[in-house]
């Protein structure tokens, strides 16, 4: 028993659960859940069952492995059996509500049951337990007549199709028994439970259908609540644009706003709707699992998102064109320059954090309107592009060469995940032992996946990009979500180094308080530097967490909008339930890994900043 | 030479277009030498002449007087273009960087860039005409300079950034701290400068070497 149970004990070496996903310091945490129906309440109950069970298991299992089972703790051992059964059953219920955590709860229940059945078996043979077992046997014998009545009651409820009542009636009783009858022989248990089975099977079938229908409707309702109304957004933006075109300003939240302010407002509207669309898509992925087919609403979500993004590009272009017209009409060169620079600086931060080509095309086309008929500004812009373009190109070339060198050691973590999280022998990770083409998914349980991946990557050098600073006091940098990997970690001392690099670039791009950048490329480079963004950050992996794809995208905070770039939603995030050869790749099983790095260097696009080795 | 501001004539008149066509052609041949060059000069003049014919045809309807004026301008432009092509093709500039082995390039274009809004002027000395036409070895020297008038730069020692890549698949080097660049002479046609000293750092391995050298950049149109 010692050999079999030893790996399991490592999982238990942990502290109390917090609202987070399973990670290297707390691998035993449940997968996080999102709000829909009453599933958070059930999720909390499952967490309690799991926690209680694991606490007792952690105490008793080492004693079992030493053949030193305490008879005095038999009751607790029986309770673990009941809790694990509750966990398995309610984990399934959570799945029918669209919660990925349900899969992990169910599997963790089964995982522990495998070893706990051996503990129970050991108790059955324990001389000191025989008196208690005999007591249970007598009690169940005495209740035979009562049980026959209970079978009849359950059958009547089933016949009357009072499914909910039948379920409550049955499981209240079963849970009480399961803490005791597990110590009886399998034959004795069958004798007690078998008479209920026909009614229970009918009730289970009916309740699954009911729960799936409720889950489907609840997810649909929730999706309608979160999905953005693009027509409303575009109509609101159009009103602002019409006001601006008429008067040169428009009121945002009661405040008179100029073109640059409006450009930033448009960007905020887009980001907000983008995050809500991601949530809507995630809910539909989950609903597909509940309905056991891909949601028919998904194509509409993709096309609506794409259309909206195209329409937003047109609005950006229209607003900049109106501002260029206004500035040119003034006949004042200073006004024209100021307006051009303000527009550049308003759009550059958005462009830095998204690589949606139609947006860049629209912006370049619109900004050209400032310079087309203005000899002075046009000439300066042309000169500026000449004076800075080659410098940026060479700076990038130098930085790329250094980053390539650094990446020989700190290679891309996305590319390494499939090998690092591939199941080995009896430890199950996020990929099956034999590659199937499926992306990261829960092969076994989340703590196993965390442990396996951490064994291969924790403390090792690695890199990820692009990395965006959230702008919070902790200086959190987040790496974009791609190939089921992203990162979130404090940039620490790297922040200062990035600020220094930003200052240097500013000087090289001939920019100071009186002289703003004059080209979109320079404005973009400076915006990235000033935001503290980097194309890639390298360092050593100091933590990782396994998260459910559905939950993460359904609960993405607005501030983290850049995790998935604006524009067309990437279908590659999860192509759908159907895989080759008629196989199914359930949405709720889809996982991703969040890394944390101890940053050592960053490639800003135009420089590589490196911290001295500790 | 791009300076003083406002001197760029690209797209501003019919005759200027012809001049610019020839000038761009001149840039394309930078780096060639010998009989090849004569052939290219002839070809470029021929191309300009073809362009002139086309321009003539377009302005037929504009009336005799206008045509006369246009022809006069076109002829001026053509002469300028001929001069420029001959000058640039014969003298493409050069660069020599004392590295191990030395980097020697038989072309170097000089661009002096000024701004109307008061930001510092920039001098670019590069071994290629533009990014699309870059060949290797490739070198860029870039400095902010105190004047947009070439003659005023003569004799001055300025700080510059230097980038070098000897082969397309080879290592990239950049200056680690400023390189000291002495402008030996400067006029509207060319800028001669001496790299007095500095350190070049290899981008990937961070290996450092000292650098000196000489450049003679020909003005770009």
Image (tube, coloured by chain):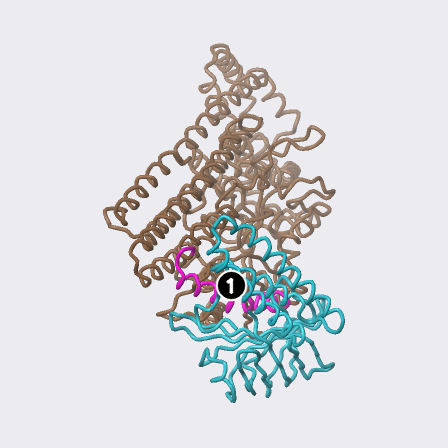
Q: Residue at x 50, y 81 (%)?
A: B150
Task: Identify the colour of chain A in the image.
Answer: brown
Nearer to me, B95 or A49: B95
Q: Residue at x 56, y 48 (%)?
A: A546
Picture quarter with the C terminus of chain A:
bottom right
Nearer to me, B75 or A22: B75
Nearer to me, B80 or A170: B80
x, y percent for residue B9: 49, 64
The residue indicated by pointer 1 is B73
The cyan chain is B
| B119 to the left or right of A605 | left
| A34 to the left or right of A431 | left
x, y percent for residue A350: 44, 53
x, y percent for residue A394: 59, 68
| Prevailing secondary structure class for the magenta stretch in the rendered image | helix
Nearer to me, A287 or A173: A287
Chain letter for the residue marked with disc 1 in the picture: B
Crowding around mark 1 (Cα neighbors within 10 Å: few <14, some 14 to 19, many 20+) is some
The residue stretch that appears in magenta: A372-401
Q: Residue at x 53, y 37 (%)?
A: A100
Image: A514 above or below A425 = below
- Residue A377 highlighted magenta (yes or no): yes
| B115 to the left or right of A331 | right
Give the quarter of the image for residue A291.
top right
**Mark 1: which secondary structure?**
helix
């Amino acid at each position: 028993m010692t050999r079999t149970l030893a790996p399991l004990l490592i999982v238990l070496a942990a502290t109390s659960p917090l609202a987070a996903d399973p990670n290297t310091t707390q691998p035993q945490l449940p997968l996080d859940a999102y709000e829909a129906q009453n599933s958070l309440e059930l999720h909390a109950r499952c967490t309690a069952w799991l926690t209680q069970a694991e606490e007792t298991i952690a105490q008793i299992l080492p004693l079992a492995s030493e053949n030193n089972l305490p008879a005095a703790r038999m009751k607790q051992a029986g309770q673990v059996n009941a809790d694990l059964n509750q966990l398995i059953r309610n984990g399934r219920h959570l799945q029918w509500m669209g919660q990925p955590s349900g899969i992990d709860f169910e599997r963790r229940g089964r995982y522990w049951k495998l070893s706990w059945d051996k503990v129970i078996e050991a108790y059955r043979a324990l001389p000191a337990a025989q008196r208690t077992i005999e007591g249970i046997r007598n009690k169940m014998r005495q209740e035979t007549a009562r049980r026959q009545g209970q079978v009849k009651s359950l059958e009547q409820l089933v016949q009357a199709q009072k499914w909910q009542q039948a379920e409550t009636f049955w499981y209240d009783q079963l849970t009480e028994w399961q803490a005791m009858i597990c110590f009886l022989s399998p034959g004795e248990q069958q004798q007690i439970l078998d008479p209920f089975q026909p009614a229970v099977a009918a009730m289970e079938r009916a309740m699954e259908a009911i729960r799936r229908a409720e889950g489907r409707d609840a997810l649909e309702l929730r999706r309608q609540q979160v999905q953005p109304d693009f027509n409303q957004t575009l109509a609101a933006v159009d009103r602002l644009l019409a006001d601006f075109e008429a008067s040169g300003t428009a009121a945002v939240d009661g405040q008179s706003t100029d073109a640059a302010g409006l450009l930033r407002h448009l960007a905020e509207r887009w980001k907000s709707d983008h995050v809500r669309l991601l949530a809507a898509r995630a809910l539909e992925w989950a609903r597909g699992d509940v309905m056991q087919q891909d949601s028919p609403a998904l194509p509409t979500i993709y096309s609506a998102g794409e259309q909206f993004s195209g329409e937003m590009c047109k609005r950006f272009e229209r607003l900049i064109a109106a501002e260029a017209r206004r500035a040119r009409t003034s006949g004042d060169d200073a006004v024209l320059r100021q307006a051009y620079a303000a527009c550049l600086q308003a759009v550059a931060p958005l462009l830095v954090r998204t690589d949606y080509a139609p947006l860049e095309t629209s912006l370049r086309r619109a900004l050209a309107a400032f310079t087309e008929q203005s000899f002075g500004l046009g000439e300066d812009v042309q000169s500026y592009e000449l004076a800075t373009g080659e410098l940026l190109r060479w700076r990038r070339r130098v930085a790329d060469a250094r980053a390539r060198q650094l990446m020989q050691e700190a290679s891309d973590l996305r590319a390494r995940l499939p090998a690092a999280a591939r199941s080995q022998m009896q430890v199950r990770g996020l990929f099956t032992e034999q590659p199937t083409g499926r992306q990261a998914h829960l092969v076994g349980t989340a703590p196993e996946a965390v442990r396996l991946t951490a064994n291969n990557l924790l403390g090792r050098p690695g890199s990820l990009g692009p990395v965006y600073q959230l702008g919070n006091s902790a200086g959190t940098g987040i790496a974009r979500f791609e190939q089921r990997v992203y990162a979130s970690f404090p940039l620490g001392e790297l922040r200062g180094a990035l600020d220094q690099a930003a200052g240097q670039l500013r000087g090289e791009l001939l920019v100071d308080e009186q002289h703003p950048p004059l080209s979109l490329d320079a404005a973009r480079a400076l915006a990235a530097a000033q935001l503290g963004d980097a194309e890639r950050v390298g360092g050593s992996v100091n933590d990782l967490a396994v998260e459910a794809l559905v939950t993460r995208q359904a609960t993405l905070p607005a501030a983290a909008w850049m995790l998935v770039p604006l524009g067309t939603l990437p279908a590659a995030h999860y192509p759908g339930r159907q895989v080759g050869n008629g196989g199914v790749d359930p949405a709720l099983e889809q996982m991703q890994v969040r890394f944390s790095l101890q940053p050592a260097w960053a490639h800003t696009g135009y420089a590589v900043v490196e911290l001295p080795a500790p | 030479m791009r300076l003083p501001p406002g001197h760029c004539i690209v797209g501003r008149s019919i005759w200027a277009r012809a001049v610019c066509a020839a000038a761009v052609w001149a840039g394309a041949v930078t780096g060639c030498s010998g009989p090849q060059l004569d052939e290219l000069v002839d070809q470029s003049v021929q191309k300009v002449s073809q362009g002139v014919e086309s321009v003539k045809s377009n302005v037929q309807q504009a009336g005799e007087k206008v045509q006369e004026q246009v022809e006069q301008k076109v002829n001026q432009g053509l002469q300028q273009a001929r001069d420029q092509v001959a000058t640039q093709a014969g003298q493409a500039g050069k660069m020599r960087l004392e590295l191990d082995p030395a980097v020697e390039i038989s072309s170097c274009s000089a661009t002096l860039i000024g701004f109307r809004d008061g930001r510092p002027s920039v001098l670019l000395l590069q071994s290629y005409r533009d990014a699309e036409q870059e060949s290797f070895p490739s070198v860029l020297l870039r400095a902010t300079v105190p004047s947009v008038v070439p003659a005023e730069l003569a004799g001055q020692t300025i700080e510059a950034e230097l980038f070098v890549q000897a082969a397309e698949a080879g290592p990239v080097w950049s200056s680690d701290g400023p390189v000291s660049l002495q402008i030996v002479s400067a006029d509207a046609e060319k800028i001669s400068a001496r790299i007095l000293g500095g350190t070049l750092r290899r981008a990937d391995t961070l290996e450092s070497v000292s650098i000196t050298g000489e450049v003679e950049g020909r003005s770009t149109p």
